[in-house]
Amino acid sequence: MKEKLEQLRAEVLERLEGIKDKKELDELKIKIMGKKGQLTEILRGMGSLPAEERPKVGQLVNQLRQELEERFEKAEAVMEENLKKARFALETVDVTMPGKKKRVGGLHPLNSVLESIIDIFVSMGFDVVDGPEVETDYYNFEALNVPSDHPARDTQDTFYLTEKFLLRTQTSAAQIRTMEKRKPPIRIISPGRVYRADEVDATHSPVFHQVEGLVVDKGITMCDLKGVLEQFAHEIYGPETKVRFRPSFFPFTEPSVEVDVTCGECGGKGCRVCKGAGWIEILGAGMVHPNVLSVCGIDPEIYTGFAFGIGLDRLTTTRHKISDIRLLFENDLRFLEQFSR
Ligand code: PHE
């Protein structure tokens, strides 16, 4: 009997060594200690022993039971501890690891300058309207009082799609579309892309951007034009900037002006940026030609207005000291990231 118990003990201890998971452990426990387990079996067999041996054997069996119970308990505890350790290892957060940075996009410099232009005009009560980039000859030229023999109509300057359709050469087309739909008082700006068959160089691109402006109401004069555009220039370039109005010519405005501001780089002394002039041209403007008002069904005897066309690309390059307009269109991230806010 004693040998049997010794053998069982050795067997259990050996098997406990090799156990890998909780299920195996539970199975072994039942097999040994369960109701029909090997140890219980031995206990039952005690009935056949002579009466004087029973207490001694009983003591041995109980000792073994106690020992095995303890060992099972310990094995269980070790197993649980290992499981916990494994889970912790899996869930560990290394707080010294560098974080994952979320890359956020930024505004293209053209768009951020456009946004500040829009803010300035919206604060003066202007609406923003949109116009198509594919225009008809009527909206781009004819209704704007551009005569049919005007050099701008030449195929060398304008991208014609068909005889009637073209890529707009100026946002001024939006003036006509607006005046057809709205009656005075009108106060709008219309930003967008325009196209001209220009040779590409540091200051010219076949695609560029303008922001058109139009005000039509009773009693609008050149003073309003000067006031609004001076205010605009001061807000964009700073209050110390001087603004100059030069007589010019556009078929759809009379009188017409070109507006220059003192060069932000040299303050007007003359430098590389302003090519020694001290001034930088930023827009064309004028009082809306009576013919243009009439064509849109607005009586020029009652209403007057002014219009302007801002060169957005020029404004952006001068404001950010960008030396070449082509940089605005190449989408080189190393360039663009310098402007993301
Ligand atoms: N459309 C003109 C240009 O492209 C600019 C302009 C707009 C001039 C409105 C006067 C009034 O040069």
Image (cartoon, rainbow, N blue to C red):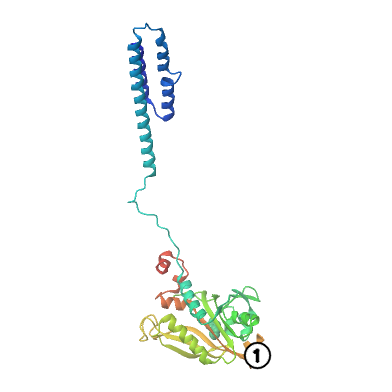
Is 270 on the left-hand or right-hand side of 205?
left
Tell which of 164 and 225 is nearer to you: 225
Between 201 and 253, the residue placed more toward the observer is: 253
Residue drawn at x 35%, y 14% is 58
Q: Position of residue 268 (x, y in %)?
A: 37, 86
Amino acid at dot 1? Asp
Q: Position of residue 92 (x, y in %)?
A: 37, 45
Expressed as whole percent of the image width and height from the top left, the position of residue 41 reads 43, 15
Residue 79 or 144: which is nearer the viewer? 79
Left or right of 226, for residue 164? right
Q: Quadrant of the C terminus?
A: bottom left
* Residue placed furthest toward the bottom: 301
- Left or right of 249? Residue 271 is left
* Camera-side residue of 226 and 147: 226
Report which quarter residue 150 is drawn in: bottom right
Q: Which residue is mark 1?
A: 299
290 relative to 64, above or below: below
* Residue at 42% from the left image edge and 30% from the top image edge: 22
Q: Is any atom of residue 17 visible in this view?
A: no
Q: Position of residue 121 (x, y in %)?
A: 51, 80
Is 302 drawn above or below residue 46 in the view shown?
below
Residue pictured at 44% horizontal, 24% vertical: 27
Work out which quarter of the rendered image holds the N terminus and state it: top left
